[in-house]
């Protein structure tokens, strides 16, 4: 689901790319992933979240107002909504 929303986001914006990094794992029940979002090779966003429950630890994306606590799906939908309003 996360990958699908990121693909939708990259389809909306020419030159927008993304990658997901595994930044932490205790090997049992806690994995933190980080989504990096780029436009024309310049980083425009970063979202860190827990893989197991989707809880967002921290994020920033352009002028999107940060609202924590949040879930990864909500943040990605906010980012897509933001891009739809500025496009």
Image (spheres, helix red, strand yellow):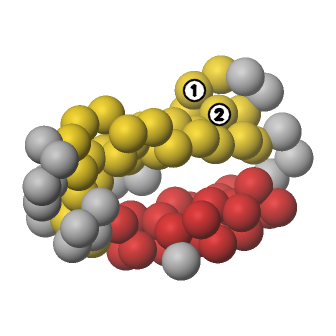
In the rendered view, does 47 fall on the left or right side of 87?
left
Element at badge 1? Answer: strand
Q: Nearer the viewer, residue 39 or 66?
A: 39
Residue 65 position within the rendered picture, expressed as x and y whole percent measured from the top left:
33, 53
Q: Are marks 1 and 2 in contact (CB under 8 Å)?
A: yes
Q: Residue at x 55, y 33 (%)?
A: 44
Residue with the mark numbered 2: 38
Residue 45 visible from this viewpoint: no
Quadrant containing the C terminus is bottom right
Q: Can you tell which mark lies on residue 17? A: none
Q: Residue at x 52, y 61 (%)?
A: 79
Q: Residue reaching furthest front?
A: 27
Element at badge 2? Answer: strand
- The mark nearer the N terminus, 1 or 2, is 2
Q: Could you tell me how far apart the alpha carbons at marks 1 and 2 are, in whole angstroms?
A: 4 Å
Q: Quadrant of residue 23?
A: top left
Residue 50 position within the rendered picture, expressed as x and y whole percent measured from the top left:
23, 57
Residue 17 position within the rendered picture, expressed as x and y whole percent measured from the top left:
72, 41
Residue with the mark numbered 1: 43
Q: Residue at x 42, y 52 (%)?
A: 64
Q: Residues within 10 Å of mark 1 (few under 14, many from 20)?
A: some
In the rendered view, does 59 fall on the left or right side of 73?
left
In the rendered view, does 26 fall on the left or right side of 14?
left
Q: Residue reaching furthest right?
A: 14
Q: Residue reaching furthest top?
A: 42
Q: Nearer the viewer, residue 8 or 80?
A: 8
Q: Residue at x 12, y 60 (%)?
A: 29
């Amino acid at each position: 689901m996360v990958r699908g929303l990121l693909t939708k986001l990259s389809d909306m914006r020419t030159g927008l790319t993304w990658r997901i990094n595994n930044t932490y794992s205790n090997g049992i029940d806690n994995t933190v992933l980080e989504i990096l979002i780029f436009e024309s090779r310049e980083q425009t966003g970063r979202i860190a979240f827990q893989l197991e429950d989707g809880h967002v630890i921290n994020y920033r994306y352009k002028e999107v107002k940060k609202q924590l606590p949040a879930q990864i799906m909500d943040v990605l939908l906010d980012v897509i909504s933001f891009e739809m309003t500025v496009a």
